[in-house]
Amino acid sequence: MYRSLSTDRVFDFINNGLLLIVIGMILFPLLFVVSASISDPNLVNMGQVWIWPRGITFEGYQRILHNNEIWMGYLNSIVYTVLGTLLHLVVLLPCAYALSRKELMGKKLIMWYFLLTMMIGGGLIPTYLLVKQLGMLNTIWSMVIPGVVGAWDILVAKTFFQQNVPDPLVEAAKVDGASYFYIFLRVALPLSLPIIAVMSLFHGVGLWNQYFNALIYLNDDSMYPLQLVLRKILVTQEMRSENLSSSAIQGEALAAQARIASILKYGVIVVSSLPLLIAYPFLQRFFLKGALVGSIKE
Amino acid sequence: MNTVEALDQAGQGTDRVSQSAIATVLRNFRRTWQLYVLLLPALLYFFILHYIPLYGVQIAFKDYMATKGIWGSPWIGLDHFQRFFNSYYFKDLIRNTLVLNVYGLLLFPLPILLALSFNEVKNATFKKWAQTITYAPHFISTVVMAGMVIAFLDPETGLINSIIKVFGGNAIPFLIIPQWFKHIFVWSGQWQGLGWGAIIYLAALAGVNPDLHDAASVDGASRIRRIWHINIPAIMPTVIILFILTMGSFMSIGFEKVLLLQNALNMSSSDVIQTFVYRSGLLQSEYSFSAAVGLFDSLINVVLLVLTNLVARRTTGNSLW
């Protein structure tokens, strides 16, 4: 007995130790970004900042506050995310509810009509040409309509309705003469808050984070979502100095520009991830639920 | 039997003789038409944004001209495919696509290992914190992820090179050396997705009957042996389903991140089929040719999905369909 206890302890020690290393490796870059965003950029660039901020300054955040492009991107992203999530629910929920009713004729065929698109699709070019032909290029619709709902979402929401809207309740309402519209709105929807939460969260995060559709469908800077503005700052690094500062100083030295670019860089990472980072601990159980309902095989 | 079906059958009983199958369907439809109205937005959306592009795939076999449209452009058969197969970049594109994906696939067991490890943690608070931290990077956007990679790997100011310099090494300009690209791409993906990938296995592990473990420890089985003989078999069906799904998107993993990390100097190892389709199709407007390349890519995906599913069903009895 003594021996098995001690090997148990060795096991725990090694297991927890390895886990701590993994957690450290995941946490370190996150902490560094936050610290670098409030540290003196020169110290950051010289590799003097590790985990704790040094030479604390909020210059980066001040510049972000006064940067119109970032604010505009933020606003656009909020509009696309809210509108896109609403559309998502409006298309998804009625469809999933209808599919959950067993008296629906041709249910199997309709389900396959949706599921088939998971395996085969037109691909990038035919989809782009269609969006173009529909006149959606450079409109808000190109941001919210393509990808508004996927076959997987339908499958998951349908399963939810089947499991969580008690049949006797629906039948009773029908005996009372309620229509399907009424039952959907007054019986099924009030019972489906968990699936609404999960679906909105996942779709909302997806919309907030996506850049590729904006890259191919939008060409007007004033419509760019935050992610495309970030792409300019972080990836292509094409922010011009007059954009970096509202009070662009003529003849600003190159070194100073690099300094600004650097402090802005870590600041925008924090600012753009802020909504999710704040919400995440509170919403974690919904996210987990979503990750799991999404994995239930029918 | 529920009320409506009962009422329905009672009704059918009275005038069954005169009723044809069509009439039954019509009557049924009159009763349930509202369900189809509820379905309509989704049906329309899928028709327009999924099935019309599917019909548009024919431009891969045509010489597409914007003025004539998809329908009016002349057929040219497999010319675009031939041009792609014979092009000098064909081999590079296939190789890069395969390398990035096979490398990613080799790391498929990592989230499983993390889940098994989490499952052994006894301290609930530590477990909760550990999970919260490992899940967090999943919510970082692709652009921010690429931005972090670029910032960290900067030869002069980047964190990674600062660490290398502290240990007396020389800075490495990672992103402009083609050989480094696969490591950067795959490991940054693991940093971001490891914890999230473990969730589903953790759920499967939560379903393991504790009695099995109790019985095994009474028989003197060590922790490792119990994990090997109880936990791993318990999550095997989940592992196989996820493996099939991964294979189904084999050729198309993460090209949005590839596109952001790619630059003129690492192109020889970072250009994959999908980034090529984007560049030649949308930047150079070679619609037909790019559609053909894209079609080739998705054909490989479908074939891989079907094959993996078949093999999994034959060997393990688990499959998607």
Image (cartoon, coloured by chain):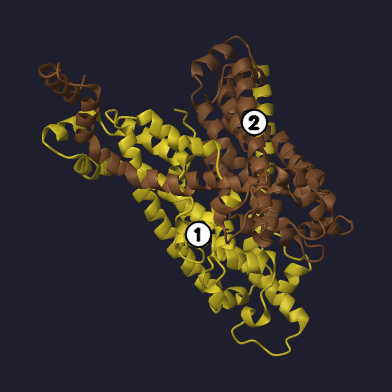
Q: Which residue lies furthest to the bottom in this view?
A: A250
Q: Mark 1 lies on which chain?
A: A
Task: State which chain is coloured yellow.
Answer: A
Q: Is residue A277 visible?
A: no
**What is the crowding at mark 2: few (fewer than 14 residues within 10 Å), some, or many (at least 20)?**
few
Q: Tell me residue A241's x, y (percent).
A: 67, 81
Can you tell which quarter of the image residue A61 is in? bottom right
Q: Residue at x 20, y 35 (%)?
A: B30
Q: Residue furthest top?
A: B219
Give the answer, above or below, for where A99 lies relative to B42: above
Numbered badge on residue B244: none
For disc 1, the marked residue is A133
Q: Residue at x 32, y 33 (%)?
A: A100
For disc 2, the marked residue is B303
Asked if labels 1 and 2 share a chain, the reply is no
- For label 1, the SS is helix
Taking depth in this image into account, of B123 and B291 the one nearest to the observer is B291
**What is the crowding at mark 1: few (fewer than 14 residues within 10 Å), some, or many (at least 20)?**
few
Can you tell which quarter of the image residue B68 is in? bottom right
Give the answer, above or below, for where A228 lies relative to A242: above
Taking depth in this image into account, of A40 and A265 the one nearest to the observer is A265
Report the side of A45 relative to B307 (left or right): right
Q: Tell me residue B207's x, y (percent).
A: 48, 24
- Quadrant position of the C terminus of chain A in the picture: top left
Taking depth in this image into account, of B139 and A160 the one nearest to the observer is A160
Taking depth in this image into account, of B66 and A274 the one nearest to the observer is B66
Task: State which chain is coloured brown.
Answer: B
Q: How far apart are labels 1 and 2 at the CA level?
A: 31 Å
- For label 2, the SS is helix
Q: Which chain carries label 2?
A: B
- Quadrant position of the N terminus of chain A in the picture: top right
